[in-house]
Each structure stands twice: as structure tokens, then as C-alpha cells.
Image (tube, helix red, strand yellow):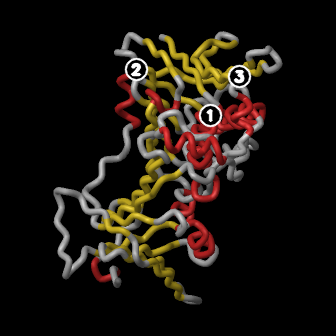
Amino acid sequence: MRFKSRMAAEHVQLLHNVIVPISRLTGGGSGPDGKSIGSGTTLYLDPEVLRISSRGGAGRTADGGGSSQLGGGEQGAEGIACFSELIAVNGIFLEHKIESIAENVIVFDIDLVQLQTALAATLQSLGGSGGAGDSAKSAPLHNSNADARNSSSRKSSSSFHSNSSILVVMKLAKRGGLPCLCLDTSCANGTLDIHHAVPVRILRAEEWQHHLPPVVNTPDVQLEFQLDRPLRPVIERLKAISPIIYVEGSMAGELVLRIDNDAVSIRTFYDKLTPRVDEESSQSQTDPARCTLKIDSKKLLASLQWQSSMARGTVGSYIICMIENEMMVVHVVLNPEDVGFFTYYIPVHFLSSDMMDF
């Protein structure tokens, strides 16, 4: 079994940007005894893609602990699933080589908080931004089109461009007899030589079937949001008032966030959203489909933390999908869109028909 890849600074930045919000779901990051390995996150590698599968709250212990000084876990994230797919070829890696007896597929458990910490330290050594809340200027990815690369090269003041002689190697190797995902940063003139090793637990390739994203029915409502209209600030304020939020969506391009309790009733309206219609489904223009979901406010907020932690320009678009009495799905497409995506699957409470007052 062998995996080795070369990454430029912009690839490290992208992987860090994706991992930061996901790592807040899982918690983990416990001590060096290795007990945190497998704290809710599994990575899949093959010659084409890198996939990340995480379960919210899986890094917490039975007594509610397990939060790490390195990052911890988002409160109320239990039950949330997150799945990400990043293109390997001309995407997240400059180049890579993977070999295994399982048709060149490698699957392993990893503590995402520890990986995020290693990536952040690597970025800091490169002169980039490793903080979870920083909005770093990112260099263009190598699979961006030529015009975008030229434009960004003229406009960007990122220090990444001054570090063209620096190379980051990500690989699987043994450290102290334990399998690890290693990040080795070196400079051509020998002035920089930094190594990080994150313990992993190697799994059989067929075990990946237990970490696939949930299978859901066709959404009743699908709405695409503009990036300048984030939901997180509103959800954060509503969470302080009520543990439950009602999300009411319409294929007319409207979304309402509603809370109702004995003390207050609040509604926040979003309009002029873009309905997304599947080819196999038909929507009546005179009677657009509607859907109401009852969601824990903590879970909804935990699934939107990427809106505050990801560097500007990393996300291309995001879509809210609503499946009645089943699931709310937040699908986020990275920029450029052929690099990959990540998706949150949020459980909802059951609502009887008489409670669905739109």
C-alpha cells in the first residue's frame, strides 16, 4: 500500500478550508494515546478522488466530553452527516501516486481536528493563513482556466507566490511503528524542513460502504442562495431565542425562518432565490411545491459554520434541499466548481399535516 502526493500552497489552503468546518462537527483531537483515531471521520483515496465522510458528535465520549483544546466539537452536531468529494487529478494535488491491492483504493479513519491542526501549521510556515476564521486570499488552483489564473496572478498579493520553491508532500508512512498521514514541507534551498504526522487506522476498502452519504428521497424544495445572503448570522440570533426553528420553503423562490414560543414569534423572509428543478420532476408554475421542516437550531447552525470559517472565494454556490419529515440537505459547491463539493445532511423532527402551517 502506497500513497504520496505533491501539493502547492493553494491546495493546502483549499483542503484546510474544507476541513475546518467539518472538524467542528466531529470533535476529537484527544491525547497521543491514539484513542481518538476514528472519531467520526473516514477518508477514501483512489486515483481520481479524495472523499471525506464525517458524523457529527462522533468524537465525544459517553459523558459528553471529548472536546479538544485543538478545536473541539460543535454542540448539537449529533446526527449530522457530512460528505465531501475533491477531485484528485489536476485538483487537490499537483500530482499523486496511489497503489493498493484493493484496485488502488485506500480507506482509513483519521482525527480531523489533528489533520486540521497540521494543515494550519503548514500554512503558517508557508506564510499563508491557517486560522479558522481568517479570510485569506487564495491563489488560483491549477485546474482553473488560463484567464482566471492570469487575472489572479496580477491582482493577488498573497505570499504564496513568493514560495514557489516550497513543496508540500502528503503521504502515508509509518512513524514509531504506527501508520500516519504525513505532511512534509521543504524548501529547495534547504532553509525549511517541517514534518507533521497524524495517526490513522487503515481499513479494508470494502468498509467504505458503511461511510457513504445517506440515501434520501427527491427533495420537495430546492433553492439556490447567493453567496452574499448567508443564513448563518440569522440562525445564530434565532438559536439564542429558541431551540427549534421552522424552515418553510417554496419553489416560488421563497424561504421563511420561523420561531414560535410563549414569549415571541419571529419570521425572517428570503425571496428571489433560484429554484432548482430536477429533470425527472415537474413543477407547476401555478402551484409551486412547498415544504416545512422542524429543525434543532443547534444542528442547523452547526451545518452553516463554513459561512464564517472558509476563505473568501472558496465557495462557488450553495443549495438548500428540503425533504418533508426526512432531511434537510445543504449542498456546497467549491470554486472552481470542478474541484469538488461538500454536503451536510441534517435530521429533522416529525411534523403532522396539521402542524405545517405555511
Is 150 placed above or below 186 here?
A: below
- Cβ–Cβ under 8 Å for marks 2 and 1: no
Image quadrant in which the C terminus is located: bottom left
Q: Which amino acid does label 1 sit on?
A: Val
Dot 2 surroundings within 10 Å: few (below 14), some, or many (20 or more)?
many
Please state the horizontal and vertical placement of residue 157, each as a whole percent of the image.
72, 45
Residue 170 appearing in the image: yes
Q: Return the disc, 3 or 2, that comes first in the chain's sequence.
A: 2
**Residue type highlighted by circle 2:** Val
Q: What element carries label 1?
A: helix
Q: Mark 2 points at which residue?
A: 105
State the residue position of label 1.
12
**Marks 3 and 2, Cα distance to the nearest angstrom?**
31 Å
Q: Give me the residue at 52% from left, 60% from top.
A: 299
Circle 2: element type: loop
- Residue 266 location in percent, x, y? 53, 85
Which residue is tagged 3? Answer: 165
- What residue is shown at x 34% (from left), y 81% (from top)? 355
Comparing 36 with 217, the one in front is: 217
Q: Which of marks 2 and 1 is nearer the N terminus?
A: 1
Q: Percent x, y for residue 45?
A: 45, 25
Report x, y in % for residue 158. 71, 42
Horizontally, is 345 left or right of 65 in the view? left
Q: Is residue 314 above or below residue 250?
A: above
Give amino acid for label 3. Ser
Residue under the point 58% across and 73% down: 234
